[in-house]
Image: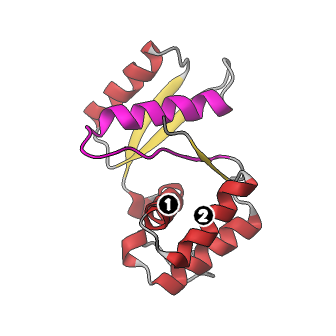
Amino acid sequence: EVHAGTRNKKWHNVRPKNRHAYLTRVLEKRLVAGGVFFGRYVKPQLYFFPTLQTVLRAVAHRVTDDTETTVIIDGVDRQSARKFTNALRSSGVRSVRVIGRRDESEPLLRFADMWAGAVRAAGEGHPEVSELVATALKSGYLVELSA
């Protein structure tokens, strides 16, 4: 974030030049390589179900039965976090806990927000990030988990 000039900002608050620098640097360094999962869903849908489905698919890719898992979801309150936790447990995910955080205070959420913004922009045909997203998908850095 410091080298790319994004600081503690979300995707829509960062200049395109800095977004590109951030994503390029992250891709070159292979931070969280093979572990950046995303899903695309057609609106309108309730937030809960597509998020739950994507988290379940991501957990299935990475988690073994004896792994303790913490899922961080942007802007989720405690009550909703409990609902997500219960839904994941009832779907067979053991030792899972969901917590909500604000992305301004959580570097991992800012990281996820940058990739989410890039995927959305690439889907809308923005050339400045389309190549980066295509490269990340081709290399396996980004993994799409949509239905």
Q: Is residue 97 magenta?
A: no
Name the colouring of the figure.
secondary structure
Instruction: Please tell me which residue is depicted at 48% across the width and 34% down the height of the picture.
Output: 147
Location of mark 2 (residue): 133
Pick whichever of labels 2 and 1 is earlier in the sequence.
Answer: 1
Query: What's the CA distance linking mark 2 and mark 1?
Result: 6 Å
Q: Nearer the viewer, residue 117 or 63?
A: 117
Image marks 2 and 1: residues in contact by CB distance under 8 Å: yes
Question: Which element is circle 1 on?
Answer: helix
Instruction: Please tell me which residue is depicted at 56% across the width and 69% down the height of the picture.
Output: 130
Question: In this image, 128 relative to 53: left or right?
Answer: right
Instruction: State which region is magenta.
Output: 35-61
Residue 2 in sight from this viewpoint = no
Question: Which element is circle 2 on?
Answer: helix
Q: Relative to 61, does residue 1 appear above or below in the rendering?
A: below
Q: Relative to 123, does residue 63 appear above or below in the rendering?
A: above
Q: Quadrant of residue 139?
A: bottom right
